[in-house]
Amino acid sequence: RPTHSLTLATPNRVAMSHACAARHSCSSVVAVISHRGRAALLRRFSSAARAPPVIDLSPLRDGGLSSSSPLVREVADACEQWGFFQVVNHGVDEDLCARAEEQQRAFFALPMEVKECMRRSADNSRGWYNDELTKQRRDWKEGLDFGSTPPMDWSLADADARNGTLDGYNRFPPADLLPSFRPTMLEYYDALAGVATGLARLFSLGLGMPADFFEPYLRRTQHTSYLRLNYYAPYTGEDPTQLCISPHKDAGFLTVLRQDVGCHSLQVRDRQAPDGWVTVR
């Protein structure tokens, strides 16, 4: 099933993060965006002894937050106790999420020979792949990575020399096959980056610093974020221990993730019970 994640990283750190359809033990913070109502999500978790919190971001859009604001404390507690939380009322348009998922499904349904033309290479780590390893074990997934560029000018051609980064250039499927893919995904990228910027302000306040403390490092033309699209196909092998991705921790500053609403296989480790895993629904 599809998941989408955007990893926000500072300029001095290239993010190597995975949206997970398996087990996730957090070192950086992971926020899962959801369009379910908060009450509905809380009901889903009501039978669990412990679960990552569901946080309403509405007060973030109202402004006027301080280090003593309930939302700031709620996020700080989630970061300290879990390193992971779900957010509702995050401001990402539901129609945009639906269009992004539609385009993602269309991309992964393309013929293999089309995707092979976008395969990541030794000199360009952006693009499509189906051979990634996690914890020295091959993942059961396909993925597509693209991300920020030095000018952050989406009107430039992807192969324009000004778009070159340490990890290469963005690559998208041919416009004659999927004409809406690139514009939709870039719009989606910008929307998720907006969520990440708002969360960074909450982190700053929760640490007792000014709300804009991280902003010099996370300006549009400064950070090195990327968006990863993952597709986890039904497993057809014979190994009962195979996971889509092995248990892992994300690098980078923050991961904003959205999983397929019809398939809940994302799990997070309970720090109070290291051998316990909680499914995020």
Image (spheres, rainbow, N blue to C red):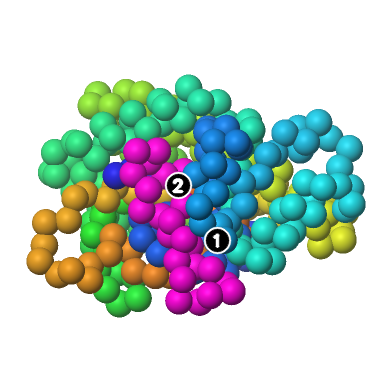
In whole angstroms, how far apart are the C-alphas of marks 2 and 1? Answer: 15 Å
Q: Depth-wise, is mark 2 or mark 1 nearer the camera? A: 1
Residue 112 vertical placement versus 22 (above, below): above
The residue at 57%/72% (across/down) is 271
Residue density around tag 2, few if under 14, some if 14–19, many if 20 or more, within 10 Å: some
Please provide percent x and percent y for residue 222: 65, 51
User: Is residue 2 visible to us here?
Assistant: yes
Q: Nearer the viewer, residue 88 or 119?
A: 88
Secondary structure at numbered mark 1: loop
Please identify the quarter of the rendering in which residue 102 is found: top left
Q: Which residue is mark 1?
A: 49
Q: Quadrant of the N terminus?
A: top left
**Identity, as a three-letter code, of the amino acid under mark 2:** Arg
Region of the chain picked out in magenta, as a range: 258-281
Residue drawn at x 83%, y 54% is 205
Name the one closer to the observer, 160 or 218.
218
The residue identified by callout 2 is: 281
Amino acid found under the numbered disc labelled 1: Ala
Q: Is residue 266 part of the magenta span, yes or no? A: yes
Occupied quadrant, residue 129: bottom left
- Asked if the stretch drawn in magenta spans residue 45, the answer is no
Residue that lies at the very extreme toward the front in this rendered image? 47
- Which comes before the other along the chain, label 2 or label 1? 1
Q: Position of residue 207 (x, y in %)?
A: 81, 62
The location of residue 101, given as percent across then percent down, is 37, 33
Q: Secondary structure at mark 2?
A: loop
Residue 251 visible in the current orientation: no
Image height check: is 236 above or below 13?
above
